[in-house]
Structure formats: C-alpha cells, structure tokens
C-alpha cells in the first residue's frame, strides 16, 4: 500500500502527543515509502510493525515507571499523613488520660466526702433515735402530770 506524494505529505504531519521523536517518525515513513530498502514488502511491514511494537513497549515501560513513581509518592504522602495523625492522636490520648486522672481524683474525693457524710448521718440518726426514746416517756409523764394537775384544779 503506497501513497501518492500528496498523501505522503498529508500524513507526514506529526500527530500530537504521538510519543515518537521526529527521527523515529521519519524512519517509519521511510520504511513505508521505500520498497527498495528490503527484498520483500512483507519484510518491510514486519520491520515497521516490529519498530512500532518496540516503541509501544518503550512508551509503556516509561508510563509504568511514571505510574510507579506517582504511586510511591502517594504512598509516601499517605505514610507522612498517618505519622502526623498518629502524633495528634498520641497528644489527644495524653490529654484524655490527664482528664481521666483528674476525674478519678475528684471521684475519690467526693466518695470519701460521701462516706464521711453518711457516717455522720448514721451517727446523727442514732442520736436522734436515742433522744426520741428518751423524750417519749418524758412527754408521757408530763402529759400524765398535766392531766393530774388539770383534774386537780378543775
């Protein structure tokens, strides 16, 4: 499949972002345009296909290297972010431990105070019960004395 001079000129314009250097494009065109370069047309086309495949492999390797480099950078940034997050969480953990210790010490203080007040309540309740036991018979005697005196004066 050979092109006329006009078609060849039309196809010589490089495709944007083809990945081929100008020298490689020229070499590929020369393989396609110059049938005298090799003994048979099939050999020329297989050489051209081989060159194209080699170039594709080369570009693929370059692309894979770049992808791997970007992946390593992303992984590095992710690890750095995890390190920063770890440091923040360690600080937060320390703050929470301090708050917990403060709450526990207040709890112990309040519990001791509650135990003291409960003991005081028990002691006062017992004393009040004793006073009540003493005062009831006294009131009964007073009431009976008052009745006697009321009856006496009535």
Image (cartoon, helix red, strand yellow):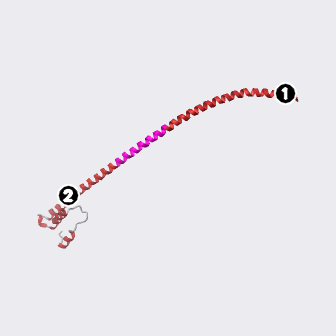
| Disc 2 element | helix
The correct choice, above or below, for 117 with respect to 41 in the image is above
The residue shown at (67%, 28%) is 127
Q: Most prominent secondary structure in the magenta stretch?
A: helix
Residue denoted by label 1? 149
Alpha carbons under labels 2 and 1: distance apart: 134 Å
| Residue 145: x %, y % from top left | 81, 26
Q: Is residue 72 left or right of residue 120?
A: left
Disc on the earlier residue, 2 or 1: 2
How many numbered markers are drawn? Answer: 2
- Is disc 2 surrounded by few (<14), some (14 to 19) or many (20+) residues within 10 Å? few
Residue 112 shown left or right of residue 128 in the figure: left
CB atoms of marks 2 and 1 within 8 Å: no
The C terminus: image quadrant: top right
Among the 4 quarters of the image, the one containing residue 23: bottom left
Determine if the magenta segment contains residue 80.
Answer: yes
Toward which corner of the image does residue 31 lie, by quadrant? bottom left
Which mark identifies residue 123?
none
Residue 105 belongs to magenta span: no
Q: Which region is colored magenta?
A: 78-101
Specify few, some or many for label 1: CA neighbours under 10 Å numbering under 14, 14-19, or 20 or more.
Answer: few
Query: Which residue corresponds to mark 2?
Result: 54
Q: Position of residue 57 (x, y in %)?
A: 22, 56
* Viewer-closest of 19 and 138: 138
| Residue plotted at (78% across, 27% down) | 140
Q: Element under label 1?
A: helix
* Residue 81 in picture, x, y percent from top left: 36, 48
């Amino acid at each position: 499949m050979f092109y006329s001079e006009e078609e060849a000129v039309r196809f010589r314009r490089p495709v944007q972002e083809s990945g081929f250097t100008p020298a490689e494009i020229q070499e590929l065109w020369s393989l396609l345009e110059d049938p005298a370069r090799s003994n048979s047309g099939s050999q020329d086309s297989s050489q051209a296909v081989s060159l194209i495949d080699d170039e594709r492999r080369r570009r693929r390797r370059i692309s894979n290297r770049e992808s791997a480099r970007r992946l390593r950078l992303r992984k590095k940034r992710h690890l750095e972010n995890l390190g920063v997050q770890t440091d923040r969480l360690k600080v937060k953990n320390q703050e929470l431990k301090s708050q917990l210790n403060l709450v526990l010490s207040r709890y112990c203080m309040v519990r001791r105070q509650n135990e003291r007040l409960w003991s005081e309540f028990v002691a006062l309740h017992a004393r009040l019960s004793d006073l009540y036991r003493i005062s009831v018979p006294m009131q009964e005697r007073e009431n009976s004395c008052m009745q006697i005196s009321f009856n006496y004066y009535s």
